[in-house]
Image (cartoon, rainbow, N blue to C red):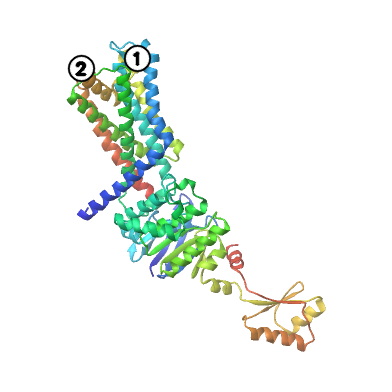
Amino acid sequence: MIVEATGLRKSYGATEVLTGVDLSVAEGSVLALLGPNGAGKTTTVRILTTLTRPDSGTATIAGYDVLREPAQVRGVISLTGQYAAVDENQTGRENLVMVGRLMHLGRRTAQRRTGELLEQFGLTDAMDRRVKTYSGGMRRKLDLAMSLIARPRVIFLDEPTTGLDPASRSAMWDAIVELVRDGTTILLTTQYLEEADRLADRIVLLDRGRIVASGTADALKTQIGGERIELRFTDEVQLLKAAGVLSGVVDQLVLNVPSDGTAAHLHQVLDVLRDNGLTPERVSSHRPTLDDVFLALTA
Amino acid sequence: MSHQGVVAACSDAVTMIDRSVRLARRNVDTLFVSLLLPLLMMALFVYVFGGAINTGTEYVNYVVPGILLLTTGYGASSTAMVVADDMHSGMIDRLRSLPIHSLAVLTGHVVASVARNATSTAIVILASLAMGFRPEGGAVDWLAAIGLLLLYVVALSWLAAGLGVIAKSVESASTLSFFMLFLPYLSSAFVQPESMPSWLRPISEHQPITPVIETVRSLLIGTPMESNGRVALAWCCGLLLFSVVLATSLYRRRSNR
C-alpha cells in the first residue's frame, strides 16, 4: 500500500475533527474521500501531506513516515489544494518553473517540463500572461500542472472541481483520467457523488470525522440494498394479487421486487405475472445511486 | 546539514528570493507607497514643519537620518503585509508541501524587503541632496552609516516577517506593524528629545531608533558620537537575532496546526 494511515485523530480545541481514521491506497489506484463539508476530508489530506500534525495515529507515504520523515514524503507527493495555489502576479510559465526548481529539477529540466505541461493543459497561448488574468478553469489547470512537474508518485487533490463550470470540470476529469493511465496514485476529496463514482476505484465515505463506509462504488450500492425491479400497477386489486405471487415490498401502487439484475430474473418475473394474468402498467429496473448510499449512511 | 543539503537550501533560497523580488516589483501599490511616501514626508518636514523646529543646525541636515529610518519603517510594515498575504493564500500550503528548507520562504521575502528598502533609501538620499542636505562625512563614514542602516533594515525586515506570520489577516499585519511607523516620531528623528516633556524623554532616549539615528547623524553631519555607535550596534544585532528566531519558530509552529 503506497498510502497507509492508522487511527488518525485530530481536534481543534473541543471540536473533534477526526476520530480515528484508517486509510490505505494501493499504488496506481484512485481513492475518493467522499463527504459533506466539515466531514474531515481536508484535515485528512493535510495530515497525509505533512501540513498538519495528527494528535495521534500514524501515516506513511511510499514507506516514509509523515511525522518522522516529512522531507522524504514531500519528495514523492504533490498537493493541489482547495484554493488554486498559484501566484497571481507571476505568469503561468514563471509559476511552473519556480515549482520545478523547488522540486530540485535542474534549470533545463524544469523548463522542458514546463513546456510539456503548458502544451498538455492547453495553456501555451497564455503562458506569458500573469495568472490574475486567467479564468477559474485555467487557474485550476495551472495548479494541477504545477503539481505534476516533478512526476510525483502520489497526488492529493482536495476538491479539484469545486466551483468549476461544467466544461472546466469535465476537462479536469479528463486530466485526472490521463494521470491514472500513467500509473499515478491519486487520493482525491469530493462532495460530488458523481465525481467519486466516475473517477475512483475505491470510495471512503467520511462523516463527522469518522469513516461510515468504504469499498468500490458498486459494493457501496449493494450494501445499501441491491437492485430491484419496480412494477407499477393501475389498481390495488392487481397490485395485491401480484404481491401474493411475487415476494416484494409494496409502496403505494408499486411493487418492489429484489433482483440480481440479470435478464433471466426479469424474464422469470414477467412470466409469473403473465401466468397469473397480471399486466403492470410500467416496469423499470432500479439500481441505488451513490446518493442513496450517501443519504442512508450519513443521515 | 550535509553538503548536499546546504546546496539545496541555498538553491531554494535563491528561487524564493527570485519569486519575492519579482512579486515585489509587480506589486505597484506597495512599491508606490514605499518609494513615494518617504519623499512626501521629507518634503513635509523640510519645507512645512522645519521652519518652526529649532535644532541648532540647518533642519534638513538634522532631519534626513530620521527620514531614512521612517522610510525603513514603512518598508517593513509593507513586508509584514506581503508575508501575511502569502500565509493566507493557497500558495503557502503548496510551498510547505514541497521538499524545501522551511527558512527559504521567509528568506525570499526578507531579501526582497531589504532590496526594496535599499532602493527607497537611495532615492531618499538623492532627493535630500537636492533639497539641500549637505553631509560632511567621508567615504568611510558613509560606508559605516550605510552598513548600520542595512543591518537595521535586515533586522526590521525579519521582525516584519515574524509579524506577518503571526497576523491573522493582512489588515492585522498592518495593525501589528503600526509601532514601526510610530516609533520614529518618539525618537530624536524630528525634534531633539530635550524639547519633549520629562516623562517622554527617557522613552525617546532609550528606544532603539534614537541611537541608530544619532550614529548616522554623527557619521554624516559630525555631531558627537559618544556611546551611540555601540548602543545602536547592540540594538540592531539583538533585534536581528530575536527577530530571526521569532520568525522561524512562528513559521514552523504554524506548519503544525
Residue A172 screen position, x and y as percent: 50, 60
Residue B240 screen position, x and y as percent: 27, 36
Quickly name the residue at label 2: B224
The amino acid at mark 1 is Met
Q: Is residue A210 left or right of residue A288?
A: left
Foreground: A65 or B45? B45
User: Are the residues under badges 1 and 2 in a single subunit?
Assistant: yes
Q: Nearer the viewer, mark 1 or mark 2?
A: 2
The amino acid at mark 2 is Pro
User: Is there CB contact under 8 Å for labels 1 and 2?
Assistant: no
Residue B139 seen from this side: yes
Quickly name the residue at label 1: B196
Which residue shows up at 54% across the image and 64% down it?
A195
The image quadrant of residue B157 is: top left
Mark 2: give few (<14), some (14-19) or many (20+) Cα within 10 Å.
few
Foreground: B162 or B127? B127
Quadrant position of the C terminus of chain A in the picture? bottom right
Upstream in sequence: badge 1 or badge 2: 1
Query: How far apart, in angstroms, are the residues tagged by discs 1 and 2?
Result: 20 Å
Residue B256 seen from this side: no
Foreground: A81 or B230? A81
Marked residue chain, label 2: B
Mark 1: give few (<14), some (14-19) or many (20+) Cα within 10 Å.
some
Q: Secondary structure at mark 2?
A: loop
Q: Is residue B224 left or right of residue A82?
A: left
Q: Is residue A255 left or right of residue B156?
A: right
Residue A170 screen position, x and y as percent: 54, 62
